[in-house]
Amino acid sequence: MSEVQHMQTDMRTILDRQKQAFLTELPVSREVRLDRLTRAIDLLVDHKDALIDAIRQDYGQRTEEVTLVADLVPSVQALKHARKNVKKWMKAERRSPTFPLGVLGTKATVEYRPKGVVGIIGPWNFPLNLIFAPLAGALAAGNRVMVKPSEHVPVTSALIQRLIALYFQPEEVAVFTGGIDVSERFVKLPLDHIFYTGSGAVGRLVMKAAAENLTPVTLELGGKSPTIILPDQDIQQAAQVIASAKMANAGQICVAPDYVFVPRTKVADLTLSLLAAADKFYPEGGEVAYTEIINAQQRQRLELYIADAKAKGATVATPESYGGPRQDNILPLHIVTGADDSMMVMQEEIFGPILPLLPYDHIDEVIDYITARPRPLATYMMGRGVEGKTVRDRVLSGGMAYDEFLLHVGQEDLPFGGTGGSGMGNYHGIDGFRTFSHTMAVFKRGPFDILGLLQGRPPFGGRFKAYIKQELRK
């Protein structure tokens, strides 16, 4: 038996054990859920230094501060938020029976029941956050979990596997590492829910595989998230915020600003201001504090985008401190002006520190451009002009943020998710709890035989016919 076949057999064995343990345990008490959430918190806090070091090894260069603020802190926040609120989330909701059932003692409620075994497929850009944040919702909802971390961060993935095994029984949470073959077999398992974060192309494959088992999916994808600078916005201020967001994790963020609409007369000013901000944040070309592109393959993809833009007539500018191509995978901010739809930077999600600037004269041009394309995961606006309300009313996006970037993702009391090409479903906080729960309707008839009193059983009497006639009035 090959290693991959053994892994597949092992995955199916663990899945069967998790399903049996889940059914045996029902109902999953609040105390059990709290204990699992607490153990996940302990895992992250107790081993934060080892996790920081593992991610640094996978990236080559990624500062402790980036991993803390982007991976560890939001993971712990998500787990703590779930632990604090799970008692409230678990409560059944009373609903109103159709008149006259309610006045005759009938009761209607909604109960949130765990789905069973949830599969979480994590990406490489935030290898802790994008596993442990959905894990918070899955555990709070009372599920067992199987995790497939990214093969592109092998040191981190192996450490997650080892730590999960220390803090959880395999019947509770299990981790499976490996390459594409393992991922393909993972999504074909008859799981009760699949949560995937990654590219749209792979998301389609995940959904297709899940369909064979009628497994529901949540897809957290990406896409091209636009930024709109309104006419009243100060350009110097905008440049500071945009450059900080675009260069965070070297732009390898699904909600990073992908391109910027700017009033035509302010393109040159914004270009210079962005480059100056990049030099300020990461002097010496990012020699020390800047995050590397995850691997040479991804760096070469981004360099191809830059070359393609230049070849098709765009102007590409970099900060003064950047001395040109390097031997490592550091790639500083590249500002692209004169971009058009024939260029790869305007066709594909960039997922790196390349930022096209698109001039506009009227806000309708911006709205028409965005709405003619797949719906973005995030839309950003800077400024307080009345045009912002128009954009908000007419643009459909996974989320929308004003005057700041990325922070909306970390709000546990807000849902996070895409729409259309940027994904389906959402999570975080109560929305994650409900994503990983089955919403079960419970109907309990009161002491009176309603249908009997209405003569609503065959052969159907006059009262029933009168009732039907009454209900069909306009």
Image: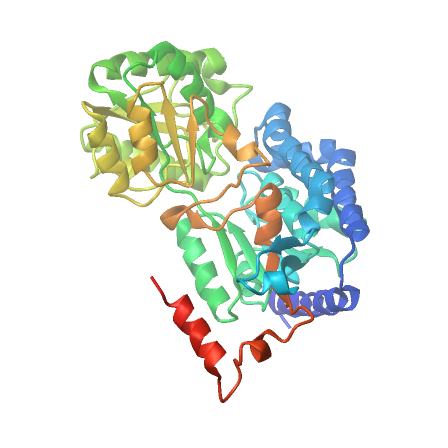
Give the quadrant of residue 29. Answer: bottom right
Q: Can you say which quadrant of the picture contains the C terminus?
A: bottom left
Where 395 falls versus 157 (above or below)? above
Where 181 falls versus 282 (above or below)? below
Which residue appears at 64% of the width and 56% of the height?
112
Q: Position of residue 216 (x, y in %)?
A: 52, 62
Q: Position of residue 11 (x, y in %)?
A: 66, 65
Q: Position of residue 358 (x, y in %)?
A: 25, 26
Where 465 falls versus 185 (above or below)? below
Would you say 205 lies left or right of 364 here? right
Can residue 158 be seen here? The reply is no
Would you say 91 lies left or right of 58 here? right
Can residue 105 be seen here? The reply is yes
How many numbered marks appear?
A: 0
Could you say which is closer to the camera, residue 123 or residue 208?
208
Which residue appears at 74% of the width and 45% of the height?
37
Q: Position of residue 473 (x, y in %)?
A: 36, 65
Where 102 falls versus 151 (above or below)? below
